[in-house]
Image: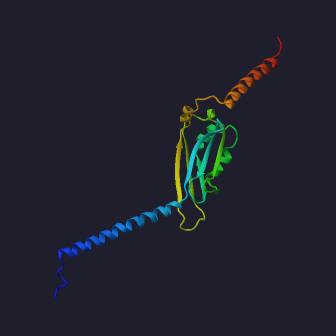
Amino acid sequence: MENISTVSGLEITAIVISVLAFVVSVIPVIILLRERAEKFDPQLVVSFEIIRSSLACVVLKNTGQVPLALSSLKFQEDWLNAVNSHGNLNELLTLKETCVVVHPEQQHVISFSANHFELPKDKSLLIEYKYHKLPKTNKTKIITDKIEFDPKQYDLFLLYKSDIDELNKMLKDKLSGIEKLLKISKRPEQ
């Protein structure tokens, strides 16, 4: 009769091989489950874009497979003050606390109401944002991120002359000429 306490080297090798085979077979299952869970995470891409050849905008795009809710979008206030010559500063500042739903493959475009050549070149724009998966539950994770854009870099890519830019320049030149004529015509005759 063989004693239980004596185990041959062959049996130990078989046990080790069985444990290793089990571990190797469980690892791919864990990886697949993790990838499947990540597949249903919201994914928001925030980008700075020039639309229609000159309009400076921030684009929010959901690249994930589930809808998401943007709960906060904070722009650097001193940068906005430098840009804001058209009066949408208050609207942009109200986005600090918001609830904007962005569905998969959908995008929202936020305009600064300024052309790219009107942007301050000496400052970068910092945007901080928060979003979460819909529907929101107690276990829903709020994702916080920030991104910085340097508008000066975009001038390097805008080497072509668009029709809109040319028209805008021509109108400014004509307007300054008209203003000079008005000043001359209002002078008292001597």
Screen quadrant of the C terminus: top right
Question: What's the residue at 68%, 37% (across, down)?
Answer: 85
Q: Position of residue 118 (x, y in %)?
A: 63, 33
Q: Nearer the viewer, residue 184 or 28?
A: 28
Q: Is residue 10 left or right of residue 43?
A: left
Viewer-closest of 44 and 148 = 44
Residue 186 pos. (x, y %): 82, 19
Task: Please indicate whether residue 142 sits to the left or right of residue 98 in the image.
Answer: left
Residue 46 rendering spot, x and y as whole percentages: 57, 48
Indicate the colouring scheme: rainbow
Residue at image location 76% in from the left, 23% down from the top: 179
Residue in the image at 70% along x and 41% along y? 87
Q: Residue furthest right?
A: 189
- Vertical placement of 28 versus 4: above or below? above
Q: Nearer the viewer, residue 138 or 154?
A: 154
- Vertical comparison of 31 with 121: above or below: below
Give how far across and how far down residue 69 sits, in percent: 61, 58
Residue 103 placement: quadrant: bottom right
Q: Which residue is outermost to the top?
A: 190
Indicate the quadrant containing the N terminus: top left, top right, bottom left or bottom right.
Answer: bottom left
- On the image, which quarter does residue 77 sit in? top right
Q: Is residue 155 left or right of residue 18?
A: right
Q: Dividing the picture into quarters, in which one does residue 70 lie?
A: bottom right
Q: How many marks?
A: 0
Q: Is residue 146 above or below residue 18?
A: above
